[in-house]
Amino acid sequence: MLKRRQSLSGPVVSCGSISGYIDRTKGLVDNWTQITVNSLTVKGFVVINYRNQFPQAVHAIVEGIKLGKIKVTEGYTIEDLSNDPNTLLKVPRVWNKLFTNEKPNGEPNSTFKLETVKIDQLSIKDGFILVKVLYLSNDPTQRVWIQKGLDASRMYVPPVKEGEPMRSLAVGKVIESKSDKYSKGDLVSGALHWSDYAIVHEQAIWNKVDTSSGLPIPTFMSSLGMTGLTAYFGLTEVGQFKEGQTIIVSAASGATGSMVVQIAKHLLKAGKVIGITGSKEKGKYVESLGADFTVDYHDEDWKQQLSDYIGNDYVDAYYDNVGGDMLSFVLKKIKSFGVVIACGSIAGYNDSSKNAVTSWSEIIVNRLRVQGFIVSDFKDKFPQAIGAIVQGVKSGSIKATEGYNVNDLSDGLQLEKIPEIWYQLFASNKPNGKLLTKLADE
Ligand SMILES: NC(=O)c1ccc[n+]([C@@H]2O[C@H](COP(=O)([O-])OP(=O)(O)OC[C@H]3O[C@@H](n4cnc5c(N)ncnc54)[C@H](OP(=O)(O)O)[C@@H]3O)[C@@H](O)[C@H]2O)c1
């Protein structure tokens, strides 16, 4: 517009350039020479620079209004939604979500990108709820959900595709509801997203969280949550584990492993519990939970240490969270007709070549039973398991308060740090117990 509007030496007060805010190509100045040939003065400004003069300016405008020279009543428009039953005024207009960007390459920061997205008010359809996300559960299986080249027909949940918001188990508070099952204000646990808010169908919710017992939310995501239940059903239903039997547990300091140790030792009265961990400190923690013996798999001779401890007795069961080389070795330490509770194979989640099992013949020669499972296979029995674990917590045999570690991102809502925290699951710096990320207070 420079060419048409300016006379020689006229000023241009540059207040804004909205035509280019969405599409930068529309904000280009292609006749810059007009400034030169017409000796124009261009002066940009930001109103806050004149804040010392705000009182004078307000006074001048008020005078203009009084004299009728400035029309105020026509100067704004109000969209009144207060009587609209569908109003969403009390809920946020935007949400921040981490989307899968490209398939993981070991660098969590390049795999996900953070975007701010407008909440589509109409997307809260019948059966859907809007949830404020409070705590995220960090789970190794999320790595499997975004695995390259997955055969979806072989998965227990649909994979998360590129460009979709990253799915996460989480606990949140219902802000708006068009569901008959969940009401505004309910605390709910289920499959939400790496985001500050989520609109999900009621079927994505597993259960309501009842904190009337006084137990904190993190307890419902650890000892009494998915990983506690995994430990319980892995031992009882899959392993058919009996009093007096012996067991080896890998990733024993983790969310699932630490519960396996306690349930096996204190609730099911195991003869011996042996933990494999990634450090001596983790080993001490696992022993404090009830393990009779631990080895640090970073020790060069960890296999020898384990063999020396077991001697010729062998063990009844192996609770396998790791797979790969560790599984290949432990298969040789299981009694004939013993069982492998195949819970996870984290060693291969980032590098499938580490999944290889080199001692398959042990399964044949020693007639081992290997049983894989997904905790949701037992969802009808969850209340019974929670009852048993709560009894353990009440009697002091299960340590619930030490069973989790919370990374608090609620201050300033630093969502971009979510992948880094999650990635600790695959690194040696992962704290003991369940790894949680807090996004907001209730
Ligand atoms: N089947 C199911 O329904 C189900 C449900 C939940 C979990 N899981 C599986 O259970 C396992 C544990 O999950 P979780 O949520 O309880 O996580 P977690 O144990 O709290 O964290 C992962 C642990 O894995 C260990 N780890 C990571 N990379 C390893 C490697 N290369 N070799 C040996 N250990 C390694 C680390 O222990 P160190 O620091 O000691 O190395 C870390 O503590 C995973 O395999 C997961 O997929 C299965």
Image (cartoon, rainbow, N blue to C red):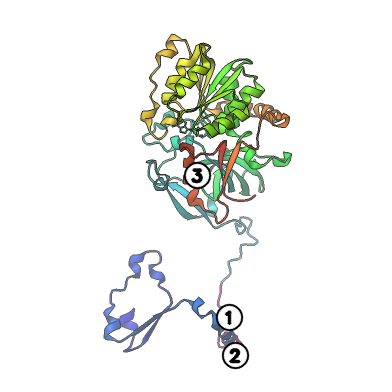
Q: Earlier in the sequence, mark 3 or mark 2?
A: 2
Looking at marks 1 and 3 on the same chain, the residue that comes earlier in the sequence is marked by: 1
Residue 338 vs 398, above or below: the answer is above
Above or below, 320 against 368 in this view is below
Pointer 3 residue: 421
Which residue position holds label 2? 67
Instruction: Write the residue at 55% across / 84% down.
Output: 57
Q: Nearer the viewer, residue 338 or 47?
A: 338
Q: Nearer the viewer, residue 223 or 207?
A: 223
> Residue at left 61%, top 65%?
80
Mark 1 lies on residue: 72
Q: Which residues are magenta?
A: 61-76
- Measured as percent of width and height from the top left, residue 339 is found at 52, 16
Q: Amino acid at mark 3?
A: Ile
Q: What residue do we see at 64% from left, 34% from top?
A: 224
Helix, strand or loop at disc 1?
loop
Residue 186 in sight from this viewpoint? yes
Q: Is residue 221 left or right of residue 147?
A: right
Q: x, y percentage for residue 354?
A: 38, 29
